[in-house]
Image (cartoon, rainbow, N blue to C red):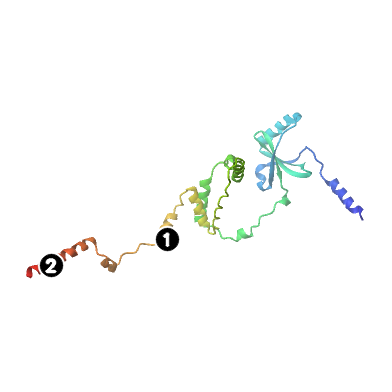
């Protein structure tokens, strides 16, 4: 019947969440309990003029207790799951994925691989410790975006733009040890103890010269004695004549 699609649309419209500026908090949990895979997009929350005191009160209590609020609110006509956490005296809202939106990892291929050796573990630990440090967000930049903006500025200034030569793609590394050694070489770190010994054992030993080869190659002193002997023979021949 033609009326059926219209009824379905009316029912869907009735189920559509109503837009609201309120956030319904359901739970307070520890931030460490939320896997970062659930986070999507951050927003900063600011209070209304008559809610500044309540805003500061909630922020301070959450900081003191180390808790994160989990709740819901309507964003772009869709009910969103959110986490609210205190950040430098303000509240930061993170939209979250629902559990059924997060796929479980496929561990079949990982579990099928062989266990790493102690040498591989030592090299991996050294690489991690070499690159270990404090997180500084200013250190990481969108280099592609910066290059595009610089290209636009040069083009606007009337500069002739020449397409750069595309670099060759590195060969696919299949050897884990080779990958770790290459990473350590780029960081300038020393190889773990024992690698130098392994390299020495792998190097071929130099061959010893044979007697026959030594006989064919006269020494410098022997080369000097030969003309002297010839000169003495020529002298005795002239005397007897």
* Element carrying mark 1: helix
Q: Residue furthest bottom?
A: 241
For residue 98, the mark is none
178 left or right, relative to 157: left
x%, y% of residue 94? 70, 42
121 left or right, relative to 238: right
Q: How far separated are the C-alphas under marks 2 and 1?
A: 58 Å
Q: Is residue 226 above or below residue 92?
A: below
221 left or right, relative to 100: left
Q: Nearer the viewer, mark 2 or mark 1?
A: 2
Which residue lies under the disc numbered 1? Answer: 202
Q: Is residue 15 above or below residue 194?
A: above
Residue 232, picture quadrant = bottom left
10 Å crowding of disc 1: few (<14), some (14-19), many (20+)? few
In front here: 68 or 190? 190
Asked if one can make out residue 118 in the rendered structure from this viewpoint, the answer is no
Which residue lies under the disc numbered 2? Answer: 234
10 Å crowding of disc 2: few (<14), some (14-19), many (20+)? few
Q: Earlier in the sequence, mark 2 or mark 1?
A: 1
> Which residue sits at x=9%, y=68%?
238
x%, y% of residue 52? 73, 30
Q: Is residue 109 above or below residue 37?
A: below
Q: Residue furthest left?
A: 240
x%, y% of residue 65? 67, 36
């Amino acid at each position: 019947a033609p009326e059926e699609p219209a009824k379905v649309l009316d029912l869907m419209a009735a189920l559509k969440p109503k837009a609201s500026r309120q956030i319904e908090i359901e739970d307070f949990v520890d931030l460490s309990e939320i896997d970062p895979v659930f986070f999507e997009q951050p927003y900063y929350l600011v209070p209304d003029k008559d809610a500044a005191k309540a805003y500061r009160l909630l922020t301070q209590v959450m900081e003191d207790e180390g808790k994160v609020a989990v709740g819901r609110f309507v964003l772009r006509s869709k009910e969103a799951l959110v986490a609210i956490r205190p950040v430098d005296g303000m509240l930061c809202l993170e939209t979250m994925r629902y559990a059924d939106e997060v796929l479980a990892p496929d561990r079949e291929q990982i579990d099928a691989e062989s266990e790493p050796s102690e040498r591989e573990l030592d090299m991996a630990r050294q690489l991690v410790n070499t690159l270990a440090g404090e997180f500084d967000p200013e250190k990481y930049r969108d280099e592609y975006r910066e290059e595009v903006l610089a290209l636009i500025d040069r083009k606007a200034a009337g500069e002739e733009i020449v397409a750069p030569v595309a670099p060759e793609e590195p060969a696919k590394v299949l050897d884990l040890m080779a990958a770790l050694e290459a990473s350590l070489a780029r960081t300038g770190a020393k190889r773990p103890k024992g690698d130098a010994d392994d390299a020495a054992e792998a190097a071929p030993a130099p061959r010893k010269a044979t007697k026959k080869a030594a006989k064919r190659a006269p020494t410098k002193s022997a080369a000097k004695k030969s003309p002297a002997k010839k000169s003495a023979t020529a002298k005795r021949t002239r005397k007897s004549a």
